[in-house]
Image (cartoon, rainbow, N blue to C red):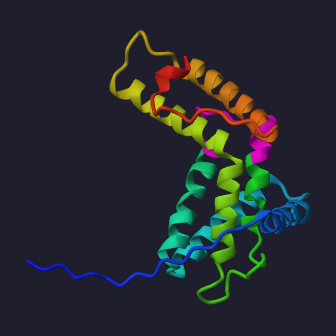
Amino acid sequence: MTTTNQPTLKVEFELNEADLDFFRARLDEARESLGAADESRILAGVADMLEKARKSNPPAFVTKRLDQLGPMLGMLDDDDWKLEGDDRKAVIDALAYFADPEDLIPDATPVLGYVDDAIMIDLVAASLSAELEAYSDFIAHREELKTEPKADLPSLDEARNVMQSRMRRRRLRSKAGAKWPHSTGSVHHYF
């Protein structure tokens, strides 16, 4: 049995603070241009971008990043997670860039149209790391409750309250420049 090695090319680039400021400014512009847009319009725009991006058969590094939008959209639609108020607005604001097909590199541009989206997804995911981690832990806890209902596990409501409180604390620390320990992968450590 033989295996065929597919040739690959690794392309790396590093964004310095000025580069990051540039992309943050583009995100701010998208938020401002869609400022009057309601949540449903932004979410519809993101869904449209995702559909078109996937149909365009983008490079794997773009597809990998497009997949990261799923949890961001999921936490908004999840009736159990109940993301509300400023927490919800933070996620909606982060998704605004992806609702504009005429973003930094227009999405219709062959091959390159979604490269800016891939970069922006990484930035948005980093800015929402507290939210994404808390939501991931919540999903894991919900699944654990389904497969192994135990009296010693917190209820879904208790878990949501604890995880969203933790999320807010971490977001505040992040804004202040503080570091926090990463999740151990076990929900029980947070109760």
Query: How many marks are shown on the rendered structure?
Result: 0
Indicate yes or no whether the magenta region holds residue 83.
yes
Is residue 190 in view? yes
- Residue 146: x percent and y percent? 38, 27
Q: Residue furthest top?
A: 151
Residue 142, horizontal then vertical, whole percent: 47, 30
x 59%, y 47%: residue: 74
Question: Nearest the camera: 160 or 190?
Answer: 190
Left or right, 24 with respect to 83, comes to right
Instruction: Tell me where residue 166 appears, x and y as whole percent.
Output: 66, 27
Identify the residue at image location x=86%, y=65%. Answer: 25
Task: State whether residue 125 is above or below residue 181.
Answer: below
Q: Out of 61 and 77, give the one closest to the viewer.
A: 61
Q: Is residue 48 visible?
A: no
* Along the line of sight, the residue nearer the viewer: 47 or 24: 24
Which residue is depicted at the point 37% across and 19% down? 149
| First to last magenta residue range | 75-90
The image shows residue 108, relative to residue 136, as above or below, that is below
Instruction: Tell whether 147 sits left or right of 74.
Output: left
Of 51 and 17, the residue lying toward us: 17
Q: Residue at x 72, y 49 (%)?
A: 127
State whether residue 46 is above or below residue 185.
Answer: below
Looking at the rendered image, the quarter that the C terminus falls into is top right
Name the residue furthest left: 1
Asked which quadrant contains residue 173, the reply is: top right
Q: Residue furthest bottom?
A: 110
Return the x and y of residue 21 as percentages of the image width and height: 83, 63
On-image quarter of the N terminus:
bottom left
